[in-house]
Amino acid sequence: MSGVLLAALGFAGAGFLFLLKFLLKLLEPLLQKDLEEGIPWLVARLVRRAARKLPVEHQQRFEEEWLTELTAIPGVMVFKLRFAVRVYLRASSTGRAMQGRPPWWEEVLRRLVQAIVRAWGSYMAPIEEYAARERARRQGFGYSLSPLVRKAIGFLAGVVRGAREVGQEALEASRDPESWEWLHRLLDWSRDKPDDDQAGGTEVMRMVIGLPDKTVSQLCRTVRRQVGKVFPANSKAPGQVVISGESAAVEEATRRALAAGAKEVLALQGEPGQPG
Amino acid sequence: MTLQTKLVLRALSKNPLKPRYGLEISKESGLPDGSIYTILARLETAGLLHSAWEDIDPSTEGRPRRRHYWLTGEGVRIAREVAASTPSLTWASRPGGAE
């Protein structure tokens, strides 16, 4: 029984192969004609489509250039097809290059870095403000904190400040359109960054009188984004807020506080938090 | 600067004033044909490369005119720097490239 089944399967297979061969023989001239005419048509179409991905003013030039290059490619039609496919796949990048824009992957990476830094900043700013306030209190007013807590706050402030600066530098550097240069700049910066404690002597303080604490805090945040470091260091009484930070940023915060309706902004001397 | 850009600049620096068309540049730089126009466009936008149509009569030559590229003064300077700093650079020497 199994012998009969095997013989039947053998006959069926042979019949199928015979039919397939017959059909291929029949279609061969048609397929050949299709390939001969189809590939050049496809190549020209790919090149024209690629040119259309470029800025309008360059389309004609590159279509002509690429079609000319095709005539110089030796060998079978498949090589021309390979050229056309490569041109087509890179046409978007070519268009970006003509507009002086960075490659797409670099733009994606830059946006990613910016998003991370923005998120980082929004989490870190309140901690940094708190740390700055605590630092000012313990230096100026003998705030009753145990030495261990003081050290912990000082350490936290240093870590947060350093991390924020790295983030800000990354954000600024990531806006640089030079390919990968921003990464090198970031690495160089982290090696060459001067120690803040050694730099010293650049911090100034002012007391803003006649503005709510919240307004001063918001104002400092805005100036931090645009000019430099300035923080509300201490609130001596409602409507009397000490701000401290880099001189340029403090100057700008002073100007804005007066414009926002502060009665007076007094210059203070000494360490942040100490009365002048 | 990417590896491909360096290879193109190195290839062009060998004879900076000789005008070359795209296929010639890809052959000399060792890069796949059809993949160098992005680099050429970037270099041209940056002012390191000039390009112009070949001045021929297509009916006499029996072929269409080609777009020729050659380095500008600044391009020559940078290409020489690249060539001096990366004497053994090849497309095959990239990470993952065939040796």
Image (spheres, grey):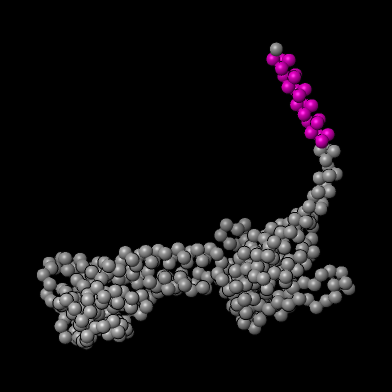
Quarter of the figure with the C terminus of chain A: bottom left
Question: Residue A260, located in which quarter of the rendered image?
Answer: bottom left
Q: Nearer the viewer, residue A44 or A147?
A: A44
Q: Is residue A122 left or right of residue B99?
A: left
The spot of residue A100 in percent (x, y) is 58, 73
Q: Residue furthest top?
A: A1
**Residue at horizontal 71 percent and vertical 57 percent from the top:** A82
Q: Is residue B62 above or below residue A1?
A: below
**x, y percentage for residue A135?**
20, 73
Q: Is residue B9 left or right of residue A183?
A: right
Q: Is residue B96 magenta?
A: no
Q: Position of residue A258 (x, y in %)?
A: 27, 85
Q: Nearer the viewer, residue A137 or B3?
A: A137
Provide residue A162's location: percent of width, then percent of height: 32, 70
Horizontal side of residue A51 vs A122, given as left or right: right
Q: Name, please, the residue furthest toward the right.
A: B60
Q: Is residue A206 visible?
A: no
A103 shown above or below A219: above
Q: Is residue A6 magenta?
A: yes
Residue at 39% x, 66% y: name it: A117
- The total number of labels drawn is 0
Task: Give the image quarter of residue A254.
Answer: bottom left
- Residue B68 visible within the image: yes
The quarter of the rendered structure image containing the N terminus of chain A is top right
Q: Quadrant of residue A131?
A: bottom left
A156 and A104: which one is in front? Answer: A104
Q: Residue at x 19, y 76 (%)?
A: A234
Q: Which is the main secondary structure of the residues drawn in magenta? A: helix
Which stretch appears magenta? A2-23
Residue at position x 68%, y 78% from top? B50
